[in-house]
Amino acid sequence: MIRITLPDGSIREYENAVSSLDIARSISEGLARNVLSAKVNDEVWDLNRVINSDSTLKLLTWDDPEGKATFWHSSAHLMAEAIEQLFPGTKFGIGPDIENGFYYDMDFGSKTISEDDLEVIEKRMLELAKQDQALVRREVSKSEAINFFTKKEDQYKLELINELEDGSITFYESGTFTDLCRGPHLADTSKIKAKVKKVGILGRLKQVLAVKGRNEPCGITEEINWQGGGFFKYYELEQYEEALANCKYEDGDLFNVPGRSPYQEYVFLKDEKMLKALEIDYKKEKVKVDLSKLYPNIDIAETLSNLTGKWIKKITDNEVEFEDGIKIDTKDLDYKLIKPLIWW
């Protein structure tokens, strides 16, 4: 019997080894749809990685920094897969998540990447995402890793492998792409919606290898730094695109967008659909939200469970009660509680 201790102190028991995704499904299908990764004994794991012993578990969603990091890291992996398919022979460095998205260091050789290429890459990423490709973790020996990337003639991955201890090396595979990566990653690519932008010319890969103690030239002088934002919900992607419309990366002129006043460049226009879902009581300084007008088929109880991280004990027509005794009136929702679901 495996005992899993959840953040609220409750314990769930399973007869056999179990994945974090299986545990999420056993709690709520809504939670399983929204969970991105899991913290097992304070280490972030893939959802499909099997738990074999008693452990503590926190399921991570888009609202958790580690959940966002997993999402963006997988977006970088997907971007690399798309680029390898479109531009065979590209050499790859590292592709981590960063605070507001992700990037991947890469060497295109003699190929010069244009803005038109970015659109092609983004389109291929979305095509791959729709294939629901599984992201599969595989432990490999150091010799296997060296042999793989030697055959691939990717000197930058070989540089990274040389710094790793045997027994600590993992590959991640999805579709046609295999990457040297410690993870964690999403269970599959189905949740990824992505936006990529060419934001400048940087020798980032050369700097990364230099801090690992290799100060000799590593063959890169100028590399395109690809920075992207991965988005779990389409309205967040739309908001990001609106922000990009207010910015010009190439000339640094942030406040000269044709057809927009200075006010519009600082403030996004109000969303009419959302305004119809809001009822504002200015005297009481209270905002009431009717989520059904934003999301017609929303399961409010499961949504609140996902937002709060609490497990549902009882549901009535007007109220949801959680296992810790907290009750929420679903007909008079606190705006601050559901703010992550809306933007304006």
Image: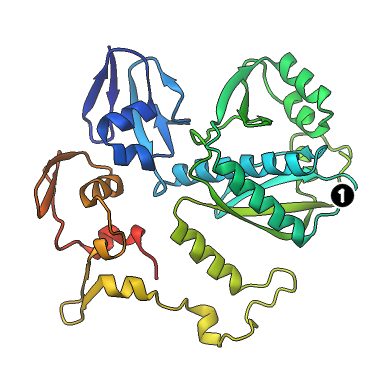
Snapshot quadrant of residue 5: top left
Dot 1 amino acid type: Lys
| 234 to the left or right of 18 | right
Task: Give percent across and percent down for residue 126.
Answer: 59, 48
Q: Which residue is mark 1?
A: 111
Camera-nearest residue between 20 and 167: 20
One can see residue 129 in this view: yes
Q: Mark 1: which secondary structure? A: loop
Give x and y (percent) for residue 288.
20, 69
In the image, 284: left or right of 176?
A: left
25, 324: nearer the viewer = 25
Identity of the residue drawn at 69% across and 77% down: 253
Q: From the viewer's perspective, is residue 169 above or below residue 299?
A: above
Residue 96 visible in the shown view: no
What residue is drawn where x is 27% and y is 36%? 28
Can you say which quadrant of the picture contains the N terminus?
top left
* Left or right: 158 as drawn, with respect to 285: right
